[in-house]
Each structure stands twice: as C-alpha cells, then as structure tokens.
Amino acid sequence: MKKIVTIQDISCFGKCSLTAALPIISAMGIETAVIPTAVLSTHTGGFTGYTFRDLTGDIDAIASHWEKLGLRFNAIYTGYLGSKEQIGIVLDFFEKFRTDDNIIVVDPAMGDSGRLYAGFTEDFVEEMKKLCARADYIIPNITEASMMLGMPYSDIYSEDDIKDILRRLCAIGCEMPVLTGVRLDSCTQGAAAYDSEKDEFIFAFSENIDRTVHGTGDIFASVFTGAVTLGKSLRQALEISVSFTFDCIRETLPFMDEMWYGTCFEPCLGKLIEYVNADK
C-alpha cells in the first residue's frame, strides 16, 4: 500500500491544508500520515477570533520517533508552512526521509492575487525557494511563481509566457514544475506543467467558473500528489487534478452562501476514485 506523509497546518473547522489533504489522499487508496505544523480552530479565510497553536517544536520529535521506527514513505508532500524556521525543519525532514525511490512535492503556499499572505516577507520567499529546489514537483500559482522568480505579477499572459515561467522555475532546481490558475482565455482555466527531461509542456483545462472558492489550491495539490504517487504520468496527474478541482467548484456553487468558508469536495470523492481507476 502506498504511503504519503503530508506536512502542513490543520484547521479544526474549514476546508484547507490537512483538513482537505487527509480525506482526499485517503480516498485515492493511499495511506496518509500527517505532521501538523499548527492547529487552528478555523482557517483564517474570513473567520475572526480563531485560536492558533504553533507546533513547530513538535515536528523534530515526530520525525525522530518515525526514524527510530524505520518508517518510509512513497511521497513527502508539504503545504502551508508558517515560518522560515518551519522550512528549515522540513528541509531536515527531507534529509532523513528522502530515498532513491520516493518523491517530494512542494506546494509553496504563500500568496495569491499578486500579494503575499499576511505575515510573510521576501525573506520567506527566499527560504521557500530552497525548499522547492529539493522537490521533484512544485505546485505554485502565478503569484507564488512570480515572487520566487523575482518578476512582476500579471494576470495577463500568453502560452509562451507560461512556458517561460515553467522553464525558469526549473532553474530553481525542480525538474517538473506545475503552475496552477492558468487562464489563456476567459472561457477556460487550468494548469500547466513542464517535464524538463523530455522538454515537454503539458496543459490541462476545464471550464472557467469566475467565482472565488476557498481551498481549491489544496485540493489540486493533494490530488496531484496522490496521482503521481500512484504512478500516473504527468499528463494524467494534471488532467485528474484539474477535472476534480472543477467538479468540486461546480458542486459548491449552489451552496456558496452557506459554504463561503470552503469547497464541497466530499460529494465528489466518488468521482475522484473513478478518475483514478479509469487510468489503470
């Protein structure tokens, strides 16, 4: 049975980070181990008065125990990390649990719509680049890619622009970068990837739904990580991730008023299983 360890925060209520990654990856038939970097009563997207407990001091102890147990994972997947210190600890985790046979996936969650998330600085971006350099796959959005590359953010770009961004992301050290939130016209939205070994670009699109739905990046990254862990090709993983994310957004639209805090991914998990099995 395949095993993934995912390292990111968990919100007791809300649909992001571990709250989404754990059920989604498990539904794909993969055993999912977790290292929570922080525990929040709710996520921070629209809630106020939430509680926050930093678990930075626990990560090394968990890793040391696992090392003594001889645990091994087919994939290591990181999401939102709250500080430069956590990035350094995760780099050490990579050293301990990296093998010749497993993969590392980094979602450099730190910004959107041209802005860094609250509490992050340019120093954090530089540290995140070090983490991305150790990954087999990275999954930034346009904002995060622009910040890591030191280029101005723009929401207007061409296919050639996307290819250039992907090539430049490879220069950070990752062989297969994936770029999310790609829109080449007003009708479609999806993702693009670059296989630097084959010098091949891959695009996958679905219908563009012009609504902001919380947690879609975490859904995409979790499905993608599960798919490549199961041995799917880069093209298959991209297409499954785009299709499932679109399904979740569409499922959420009738409930936007009551589901403003997250995406209705749960009713779509059966379809995710179908996508995974269809390519067997």
Image: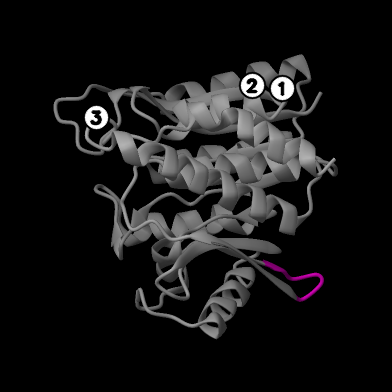
**Mark 2, other Cα within 10 Å: few <14 / some 14–19 / many ≥20:** few
- Specify the quadrant of the image occupied by residue 205: bottom right
In front of the other: label 3 or label 1? 3
Image location of residue 263, percent across then percent down: 39, 36
Mark 2 highlights which residue?
A: 64
183 relative position to 134: left or right: left
Q: CA distance from mark 1 to mark 2?
A: 5 Å
Q: Secondary structure at mark 3?
A: loop
Q: Quadrant of the N terminus?
A: top right
Q: Secondary structure at mark 2?
A: helix
Viewer-side residue, 1 vs 74 = 1
Image location of residue 89, percent across then percent down: 53, 37
Is residue 134 something one can see in this rendering?
A: no
Vertical placement of residue 115 versus 270, above or below: below
Per the image, is 196 magenta? Answer: yes
Is residue 112 something one can see in this rendering?
A: yes
User: Tag 3: residue type?
Assistant: Glu
Mark 1 highlights which residue?
A: 67
Vertical placement of residue 207 versus 79, above or below: below
Q: CA distance from mark 3 to mark 1?
A: 43 Å
Image location of residue 127, percent across then percent down: 46, 55
Q: Residue at x 44, y 24 (%)?
A: 57
245 relative position to 200: left or right: left
* Magenta span: chief secondary structure: loop
Per the image, is 110 magenta? Answer: no
Mark 3 highlights which residue?
A: 258
Q: Residue at x 30, y 33 (%)?
A: 255
Q: Which residues are magenta?
A: 194-199
